[in-house]
């Protein structure tokens, strides 16, 4: 969805879709169908020493979704809807 060149900031409104390999599906809630888009606001960014670093992610974006849940996405799983003004 997004690109590595695209920079996201805290407060940006984004649309996110999990893009995981099939063997990672157990991480997802069984009620969530694959390719379901989440909309929410970036509330934090984990860099370098983040929990995602052990899985090969340089950055993880923490998104507070419109359903009230907090989820983690990589930059390629995010599309910018509106920039924080």
Image: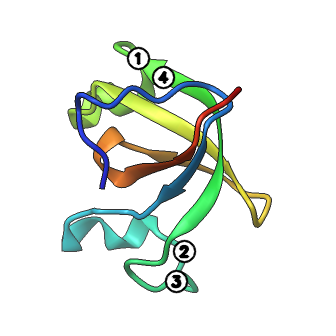
The residue that label 2 is drawn on is 29
Classify 10 Å Cα crowding around label 1: few (below 14), some (14-19), many (20 and above).
some
Q: Which residue is drawn at 20% across and 33% down?
A: 56
Name the residue tied to disc 1: 47
Q: Where residue 27 sits: x, y (%)?
A: 43, 64
Farthest residue to the right: give it.
Answer: 68
- Total labels: the figure holds 4
Q: Does the residue at mark 1 contact the one at mark 4 (Cβ under 8 Å)? A: yes
Mark 3 or 1 closer to N-term?
Answer: 3
What is the spatial separation of the Cα atoms under label 2 and label 1, in whole angstroms? 25 Å
**What secondary structure is marked by label 4?**
strand
Secondary structure, mark 1, is strand
Of helix, strand and loop, which one carries label 3? loop
Q: Position of residue 75 (x, y in %)?
A: 34, 40
Taking the image as shown, residue 55 lies to the left or right of residue 33, namely left
Residue at mark 1 to residue at mark 4: CA–CA distance: 4 Å
- Residue at coordinates 46% horizontally, 86% vertically from top-left? 33
Quarter of the rendering containing residue 50: top left
Whether label 3 touches label 2, CB < 8 Å: yes
Residue occupied by mark 3: 30
Mark 3 neighbour class, 10 Å CA radius: few under 14, some 14 to 19, many 20 or more: few
Do residues under tags 4 and 3 come within 8 Å of each other at their CB atoms? no
Residue 80 in the image: above or below residue 50: below
> Please, is residue 63 above or below residue 39 in the view?
above
Categorize mark 2 by other alpha carbons within 10 Å: few (<14), some (14-19), many (20+). few
The residue closer to the viewer here, 69 or 7, is: 7
* Residue highlighted by disc 4: 46
């Amino acid at each position: 969805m997004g690109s590595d060149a695209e920079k996201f900031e805290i407060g940006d409104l984004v649309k996110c879709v999990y893009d995981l390999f099939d063997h990672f599906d157990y991480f997802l809630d069984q009620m969530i169908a694959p390719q379901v888009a989440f909309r929410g606001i970036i509330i934090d960014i984990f860099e370098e020493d983040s929990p995602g670093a052990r899985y090969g992610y340089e950055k993880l974006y923490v998104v507070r979704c419109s359903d009230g849940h907090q989820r983690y996405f990589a930059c390629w799983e995010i599309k910018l809807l509106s920039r924080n003004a």
